[in-house]
């Protein structure tokens, strides 16, 4: 016995019209599921291959396959529903904790202070850690203040084509102000199952990437040697560069 699966016909040119069509389809789907489940409850001896369960399973599997095959449609309908939702049911559990420390050393040469702070935030999406450390040196001849801030996130760190991206992201920013002047630096690294990205001062463009079997890097410093195709490039011999053919194994 064949089963016909009816997919939603979302063809309205306006967002409000599309929302009405989605609501209508959802109401019909709920009625069909209730009817199918009612048939299953009324026939307890029916096996898992019964008509009611087969209809439900086919609809669920068909919908899942459609979402996987057409990511853009999934993302557009998802955005449309969220944008025009009248009722949003969201429940989040969050656990937060905070720790702090302080160290002071005084002597005839001056004073050294260190203050540290760590905040932990755990949700269903992952773990976030915010760290900060301030160090200061005060003496008659010299004074300096160093501040370091770091942010570490593990779990869901972004999205790609509507799919969640899981991994770890580390960001650090530091400044120093002294009698000699001031400077700052910023660094960031992202680790995912798809690869590794390292950032410098520009947080939008990585300076190095390892994606699959490809490495992209802005500057490379070879201390000793590099294998390139069938050659070994030696940068230590004769104060120059030596290209040596590799023996075939």
Image (tube, helix red, strand yellow):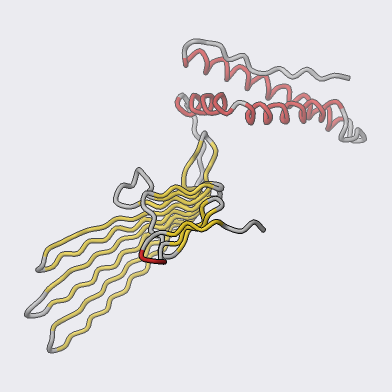
Compared across the picture, whether 112 is left or right of 15 comes to left
Count of labels shown? 0
Q: In which quarter of the image is the N terminus?
A: top right
At x 31%, y 64%, the residue is 132
Compared across the picture, whether 202 is left or right of 8 comes to left
Is residue 52 something that shows in the picture? yes
From this viewpoint, which residue is outermost toward the left?
140
At x 70%, y 22%, the residue is 31
Q: Is 126 situated above or below 158? A: below
How far across and how far down the image is residue 28, in percent? 67, 19
Q: Closer to the camera, 109 or 61?
A: 109
Is residue 122 something that shows in the picture? no
Q: Is 181 situated above or below 212? A: below
Q: In which quarter of the image is residue 67?
A: top right
How far across and how far down the image is residue 205, in percent? 36, 44
At x 23%, y 71%, the residue is 135
Compared across the picture, whether 152 is left or right of 29 comes to left
């Amino acid at each position: 016995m064949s089963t016909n699966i009816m997919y939603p016909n979302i063809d309205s040119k306006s967002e409000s019209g599309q929302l009405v069509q989605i609501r209508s389809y959802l109401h019909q789907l709920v009625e069909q599921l209730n009817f199918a489940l009612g048939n299953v409850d009324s026939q307890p001896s029916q096996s898992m291959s019964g008509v009611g369960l087969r209809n439900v399973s086919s609809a669920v599997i068909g919908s899942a396959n459609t979402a996987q095959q057409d990511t853009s449609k999934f993302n557009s309908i998802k955005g449309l529903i969220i944008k025009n939702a009248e009722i949003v049911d969201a429940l989040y559990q969050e656990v937060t904790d905070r720790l702090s420390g302080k160290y002071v050393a005084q002597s005839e040469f001056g004073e050294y202070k260190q203050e540290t702070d760590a905040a932990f935030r755990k949700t269903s999406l992952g773990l976030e850690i915010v760290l900060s450390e301030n160090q200061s040196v005060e003496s008659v001849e010299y004074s300096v203040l160093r501040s370091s801030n770091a942010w570490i996130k593990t779990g869901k760190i972004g999205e790609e084509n509507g799919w969640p991206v899981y991994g770890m992201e580390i960001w650090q920013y530091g400044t120093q102000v002294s009698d000699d002047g001031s400077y700052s630096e910023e660094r960031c690294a992202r680790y995912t199952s798809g690869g590794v990205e390292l950032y410098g001062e520009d947080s939008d463009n990585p300076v190095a990437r390892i994606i699959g079997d490809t490495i992209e890097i802005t500057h490379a410093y070879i201390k000793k040697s590099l294998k390139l195709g069938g050659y070994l490039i030696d940068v230590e011999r004769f104060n120059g560069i030596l290209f040596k053919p590799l023996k075939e194994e």
